[in-house]
């Protein structure tokens, strides 16, 4: 983004507004960044306001098409300011220079909206096309069965089930542990299951969520978890606590990793009260790499875990 004749603070507010509305990143260039411009424009550099250090960004190695702002024309009742008129003419020339330069620099785009915006590689497509298949419902599909066996071994669990989505995986696990409608699950107030999965555990599973505050690192305070567990003597009036859910990595906490020791501590609380522990491990492999801990160790205390194979696919 280039700004002309406006204060840096105003340009920065425009940048934030555009980014929030279009979900597109805009760069702010100043006169000092425009050394490639011709001499007549450099002589007019006094038209540019001094820039703040935080706003002066050198052009990236791979840029995107830039948006150039020109001052709005004055009301008809007022004469056009000579500096504004000259600035408008020069801004057109600058727009063309930047556009051509950006066009030459862009050779490839990387979509960073989410690690779910992924594409399989040619080798992956070839493997899918040549995979041996059969009736999966009857349990005869060798490829699906092999995948489930490998994932169970990797997680250190008895068995695995291949399902179309992570949301479905979490829903199945919650319903398996909460067989009686009206059961209660303790989970983070900013967890994916609670915030983003359409309230499926309630609408489909008939399970009541009991939320505990997520800390900045994605954990829930151990004392708060234990305090949220219902007294079995109150079953006549209250939902029965059956399950605790954790999320590793924790997406809404910036992808923070939960340590194996923390998970073990929550697992001990669950066992002490006769509860089950489920881990939403959509990005569990990221946590394993970041912590340098095998995935089976991170879910050792869990009774169930869901993992996704689509995150960062082909990256």
Image (cartoon, grey):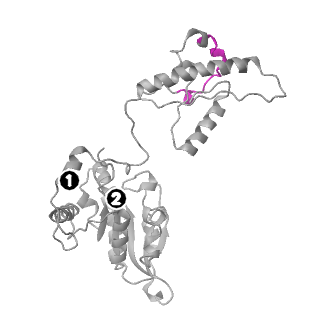
Of tags 2 and 1, the one toward the viewer is 1
Q: Which percent across, then down, holds residue 4?
A: 64, 24
Residue 222 picture quarter: bottom left
Q: Is residue 26 left or right of residue 291?
A: right
Judge the density around disc 2: few (<14), some (14-19), many (≥20) Cα neighbours within 10 Å.
many
Q: Is residue 229 left or right of residue 176?
A: right
Which element carries disc 2, helix, strand or loop? loop
Residue occupied by mark 2:
282
Q: Which percent across, then down, holds residue 47?
A: 67, 18
Q: Is residue 300 left or right of residue 94?
A: left
Indicate whether residue 43 is drawn in magenta. yes
Judge the density around disc 1: few (<14), some (14-19), many (≥20) Cα neighbours within 10 Å.
few
| First in residue order: circle 2 vs circle 1 | 1
Indicate whether residue 301 is drawn in magenta. no
Count of marks overlaid on the render: 2
Q: Is residue 166 visible?
A: yes
Residue occupied by mark 1:
129
Specify start and end residues of the magenta stretch as a single range. 42-56
Which element carries disc 1, helix, strand or loop? helix
* Quarter containing the C terminus: top left
Please determine whether, in this image, residue 191 is positioned above or below residue 209.
above
Q: Is residue 211 left or right of residue 81?
A: left
For the point 40% across and 57% down, which residue is it?
A: 250
């Amino acid at each position: 983004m280039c700004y002309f004749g406006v204060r840096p603070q105003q340009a920065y507010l425009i940048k934030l507004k555009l980014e929030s509305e279009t979900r597109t990143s805009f760069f702010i260039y100043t006169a000092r960044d425009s050394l490639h411009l011709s001499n007549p424009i450099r002589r007019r550099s006094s038209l540019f306001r001094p820039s703040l250090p935080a706003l002066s960004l050198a052009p990236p190695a791979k840029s995107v098409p830039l948006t150039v702002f020109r001052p709005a024309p004055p009301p008809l009742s007022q004469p056009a300011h000579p500096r504004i008129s000259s600035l408008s003419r020069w801004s057109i020339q600058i727009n063309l220079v930047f556009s051509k330069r950006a066009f030459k620099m862009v050779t490839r785009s990387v979509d960073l909206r989410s690690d779910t915006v992924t594409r399989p590689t040619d080798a992956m497509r070839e493997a899918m096309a040549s995979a041996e298949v059969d009736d999966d419902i009857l349990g005869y599909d060798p490829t699906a069965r092999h995948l489930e066996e490998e994932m169970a071994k990797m997680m250190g669990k008895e068995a695995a089930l291949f399902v179309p989505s992570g949301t479905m995986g979490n829903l199945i696990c919650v319903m398996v542990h909460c067989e009686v409608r009206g059961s209660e699950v303790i989970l983070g107030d900013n967890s994916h299951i609670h915030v983003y999965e359409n309230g499926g555990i309630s609408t489909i599973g008939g399970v009541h969520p009991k939320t505990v505050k997520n800390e900045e690192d994605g954990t829930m305070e151990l004392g708060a978890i234990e305090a949220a567990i219902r007294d079995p003597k109150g079953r006549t009036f209250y939902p029965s606590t059956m399950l605790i859910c954790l999320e590793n990595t924790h997406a809404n906490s910036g992808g923070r990793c939960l340590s194996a020791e923390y998970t073990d501590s929550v697992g001990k609380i669950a066992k002490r009260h006769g509860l089950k522990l489920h881990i939403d491990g959509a990005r569990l492999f990221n946590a394993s790499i970041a912590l340098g801990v095998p995935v089976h160790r991170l879910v050792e205390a869990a009774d169930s875990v869901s993992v996704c194979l689509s995150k960062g696919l082909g990256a």
